[in-house]
Amino acid sequence: MVDVAKLPQGDRLVLAQLSGVAGRYGNGADRERPRDEAIAAVCAVTTDPRLLGIQAGVAMADSHGISGATVELLAAAGADMTVAAAHGAEVRARLEAQGTRYDRD
C-alpha cells in the first residue's frame, strides 16, 4: 500500500509534475506528439519506476476509462506495473467507498 500523503515532499512534487506531463501527452493537448517525445518528457520528470508506477496506478483508477493511453505511456517510460496495479486497486477502492461509480463496469 502506498500512502502518498506520507511520501517525502519531493516525491509528492514529482507525482504532481508527472500527473500534468503524463496526462498532457497521454490524452491531453500533446497526445498527437511523437511517442519518443512523450516518453522523453515523462523521463525528464523522473525515471523512478516506483513513482512512475504510483502515477500509472492513479491513471488506472480513472472512473471514466479514458486514461489508458496515459497508463501505456507511463509503462513505456519504465513504470513498475506491479506497483501500478496495487496502487490503482487501492485508489479505486477508496473512490468506490466514497460513491464513485465506474462507467466501464
Image (cartoon, rainbow, N blue to C red):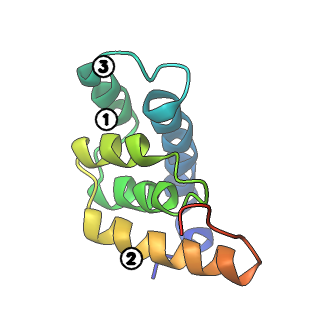
Residue 68 percent location from the top left of the image? 41, 47
Residue receiving disc 1: 43
What residue appears at the point 47 percent right and 76 percent down from the top-left corner?
Answer: 89
Q: Quadrant of residue 6?
A: bottom right
Residue 81 place in picture, x, y as percent? 27, 63
Disc 2 marks a residue whose amino acid type is Ala
Q: Is residue 92 above or below residue 46?
A: below
Give me the disc on residue 86. 2
- The residue nearer to you, when weighing 91 against 8, is 91
What residue did someone put label 3 on? Answer: 37
Q: Quadrant of residue 32?
A: top left
Q: CA distance from mark 1 to mark 3?
A: 10 Å
Q: Is residue 54 above or below residue 18?
A: below
Q: Mark 1 or mark 2: which is in front?
A: 2
Residue ID at (44%, 23%): 31
Q: Nearer the viewer, residue 13 or 28?
A: 28
Circle 1: element type: helix
Three-letter code for the amino acid on which mark 3 is drawn: Glu
N-term mark: 1 or 2: 1
